[in-house]
Image (cartoon, rainbow, N blue to C red):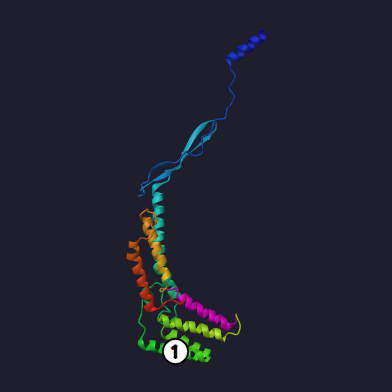
Amino acid sequence: ASAMLSSARALAVHPAAPPLVASSFPPACKRFTERPSTSGGRGVRPNVVCSARFGFGVPESVEVVEDDDDALLSRRTMLAGKALFTIGEAFVFPWATESATRPGSAVTENLVPFSTPWLKTMLFNETDPVAKARAKNYLLDGEALAASGDHLAAIALFEKVKINAPTEYKMCQRAGLNIAKSFKKLSSRPGDAYDKSAETAKGEVWWWGRGTRWPGWYIVAYLSARNLYFTAKEDDVATFTVTEGLGFLVPIWLGLLIVLVTYGLPDY
């Protein structure tokens, strides 16, 4: 009896500790909260708040906040990149292709790319009338020789067309196609030297057709500029309207048509 009494007294003085119960952990991330944007936008941006618990129920909150200055810099970088790409599609890419694929001449062979003299050669330059007439005669005489079967002599005359009038697009492209046809006639089997020369001549014609006269560059540049305009307004890229078609697209197409008919259509 005395032993039981001693145990009861001990329990009264030192009560048993309650069992450990695992604390309930909150979700890793709370719901999105919103705060106004200070970077010029009309809407609000999500602000993510994440919480975590460590140890035995001691909360520590970690808040991840998007920096407005970084967002503004990122947006400006994106717009600048789009603007540079638009300029490249409208000017740099077609000019570089034109320079790399047009017939070489004494005027252009030593020019530094994108220098002022080089840029002037991208514009229309009137060919000397005497040289143009001489090149025209070479072209017609070469076609007559090719028709008679003398393809090597014809090729030599076609090459003189490009030497005498390297900026005459239509005439040079016609001579280039004739060179490819003559080499093809001289070829006896696919893959021989003449056949490879024919493919090379055809490739030169095709690539020069992708230069400044190719409308694809300007169509893509217009679409890129349009996308840049609506992105800068923080607006969805809207569909084409009648006003836009009459005010921009029709004049662009008519201008391209006049230029291509006047200075030469690309050879496909």
Q: What secondary structure is the stretch in magenta mostly built from?
A: helix
Which quadrant does the N terminus fall into? top right
Badge 1, how many Cα within 10 Å: few under 14, some, many 20+? some
At a point 52% along the width and 89% down the height, the residue shown is 151
Q: Residue at left 60%, top 82%?
A: 192
- How many marks the image carries: the answer is 1
For residue 145, say whether it is visible: yes
From this viewpoint, is residue 88 visible?
no
Give the labeled residue for mark 1. Answer: 140
Magenta-span inclusion, residue 131: no
* Residue found at x 38% / y 89%: 133
Q: Is residue 125 left or right of residue 196?
A: left
- Which residue is depicted at the point 62% across and 12% down? 8
The amino acid pointed to by label 1 is Leu
Among all residues in the image, which is located at the extreme top? 1
Q: Which image quarter: residue 196?
A: bottom right
- Find numbered disc 1 in the image and state the secondary structure of the residue it sits on: helix
Question: Residue 98, percent across and down?
Answer: 43, 74
Identify which residue, 23 or 234, lies in the foreground. Answer: 234
The answer to whether 3 is drawn above or below residue 232 in the figure is above
On screen, 40 above or below 23?
below
Q: Is residue 256 above or below residue 64?
A: below
Q: Position of residue 35 (x, y in %)?
A: 39, 42
Q: Is residue 198 magenta?
A: yes
Seen from the viewer's position, the closer of residues 155 and 10 is: 155
Residue 246: quadrant of the picture: bottom left
Q: Nearer the viewer, residue 197 or 222?
A: 222
Residue 218 horizontal/vertical position (percent): 40, 68
Start-end of magenta stretch: 191-211
The image shows residue 111 at horizontal and vertical percentages of 41, 77
For residue 49, above or below residue 114: above
